[in-house]
Image: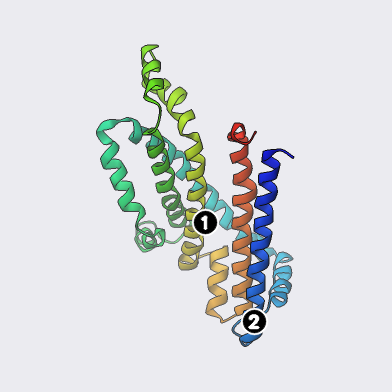
Amino acid sequence: MSVTQSTGVRSKSAYLVAIAFILFFWQVAAWYLPDFLMPDVWTSMVRLWEELNSGDFYEGLANSMSRLGIGYGFALFFGIVLGLLGGTVNAIRSPFKAAIIILQSIPSIAWVPLFLILMGFGNLPIIVVVAIGAFFPTALSVINATESVDKVHISAARVMGASRFQLLKRVYFPAVTPELITGAQLAFGNAWRALISAEMIVGFSAGLGRSLAYSGEVADMTGVMTNILVIAILAAVIDQVVLESIKHRLLRYQYL
């Protein structure tokens, strides 16, 4: 078995063990609490199956995934571009990095009231909040990575007549890719939490966050737990299946 396959098996096994522990403690809590406060695992699974056969579920899922995709995509693009510029232009590196550190300390959800006033109810404020949540860790990881680029490589490229664009493309970007991918995974976690939180607050149309908020408003605890289960499963699948697959393809030389 190769190192890549061994690592993949261990990762999947760890997730299965974690899921088993979570379900176990959930069931134990359900045994000791009234049904209207904590439904058991089986009841929630039955509700989940019903939801999976409902058109409303897929409408909400599609809305959430589209908002996530647009916001996360913009965050990665601008995080990479501005991170490379901020990391390679000495005049702006320190203030730009300081601004990112300060702004990323603000929870993404704190921006929602401002953007609702500026942009009104709609998809745009949610997308912007998602983008903000993912932008800062992406840009910061790129800036930090540029600071560790081997100066010999930079000097050699300049001696050979490389332009600033060629330096970015041929020297800096390949060097920062490993840390960029790690930053992108961290950024996904921020983007996902920002998405669910923003949808819970804005709640103008179907979405995973809105469905969770509505279940809480009507005291439907089975619905609450079912929605939490869906949110957790989707996050794990996207992170461990989609993003890990991309990571292994881009950094396959590290897993040989």
Q: Residue 251: percent from the left, percent from the top?
A: 58, 35
Residue at label 2? 30
**Would residue 41 appear left or right of 106 to someone viewing this image?**
right
Mark 1 vs mark 2: which is more N-terminal? 2
Q: Residue 218: percent from the left, percent from the top?
A: 56, 81
Label 2 crowd (10 A; few <14 / some 14-19 / many >=20): some
Where residue 140 is drawn, which disc sits there? none
Q: Does 222 sit above or below residue 56? A: below
**What secondary structure is found at the residue carrying circle 2?**
helix
Say if residue 206 shows up in the picture.
no
Q: Does 80 sit above or below residue 223? A: above
- Quarter of the figure with residue 116: bottom left
Where residue 192 is drawn, which disc sits there? 1
- For marks 1 and 2, give the one nearer the viewer: 2
Along the line of sight, which residue is nearer the eye, 185 or 68? 185
- Quarter of the figure with residue 125: bottom left
What residue is drawn where x is 69% and y is 44%?
A: 6
Q: Residue 160: percent from the left, percent from the top?
A: 40, 11
What residue is drawn where x is 60% and y is 62%?
A: 232
What residue is drawn where x is 59% and y is 68%?
A: 228
What residue is drawn where x is 57% and y is 64%?
A: 208
On-image quarter of the N terminus: top right
The residue positioned farthest toward the bottom in the image shown? 34
Q: Residue 79: percent from the left, percent from the top?
A: 42, 41
On-image quarter of the C terminus: top right
Count the marks: 2
Q: Amino acid at mark 1?
A: Trp
Q: Amino acid at mark 2?
A: Ala
